[in-house]
Image (spheres, rainbow, N blue to C red):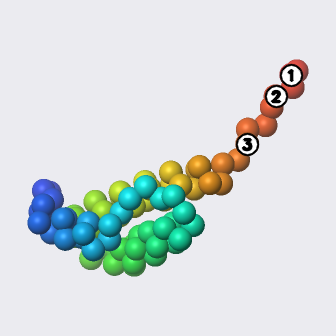
Amino acid sequence: MPTTIDPKRYARLLARTLPRVIDSAKEYERLLGEAESLMDAGAGRTLEEDTLLQLMVSLIEAYEQKRYAVPQASQRGA
């Protein structure tokens, strides 16, 4: 397996997927679907697909942390 990303192949994946900062539930669902499709490929993913998946997971996690943040409990005199 190659250890260097093919810029042209990665650029094609980016152009097809158009990942960006998630600012809506619709965009969240879209990227979630794209990430799930890549995860389904399993061991057959290319390095470029793995890289794109990492990017999308980061975007998804950032949205989830912002959107579904759990307030921290206050600590009272221990």
Circle 2 packing at 10 Å, graded few (<14), some (14-19), many (20+), is: few
Q: Earlier in the sequence, mark 3 or mark 1?
A: 3
Q: Secondary structure at mark 2?
A: loop
Q: In the rendered structure, which amino acid carries the disc numbered 1?
A: Ala
Mark seen at residue 28: none
Q: Amino acid at mark 3?
A: Pro
- Residue 71 versus residue 68 in the image, above or below: above
Residue at image x 62%, y 54%?
Answer: 67
Give coordinates of residue 37: x percent, y percent. Answer: 39, 78
Residue depicted at 53% across the width and 55% down the height:
63
| Tags 1 and 2 touching, CB below 8 Å | yes
Q: How far separated are the C-alphas under marks 2 and 3?
A: 12 Å
Q: Decide: marks 2, 3 in contact (CB < 8 A)?
A: no
Answer whether residue 64 is visible to the viewer in this image. Answer: yes
Residue tagged 2: 75
Displayed quadrant of residue 71? top right
Q: Identify residue for label 3.
A: 71
Tell me the residue that label 1 is attached to. 78
**Label 3's element?**
loop
Q: Residues within 10 Å of mark 3 (few under 14, many from 20)?
A: few
Compared to residue 5, the image places residue 72 above or below, namely: above
- Secondary structure, mark 1, is loop
Residue at mark 3 to residue at mark 1: CA–CA distance: 20 Å
Q: Amino acid at mark 2?
A: Gln
Closest to the observer, 30 or 58? 30
Residue 5, image x, y percentages: 15, 59
Q: Position of residue 56 (x, y in %)?
A: 39, 61
Q: How many marks?
A: 3
At a point 59% along the width and 49% down the height, the residue shown is 66
Quadrant showing the N terminus: bottom left
Q: Nearer the viewer, mark 1 or mark 2?
A: 2
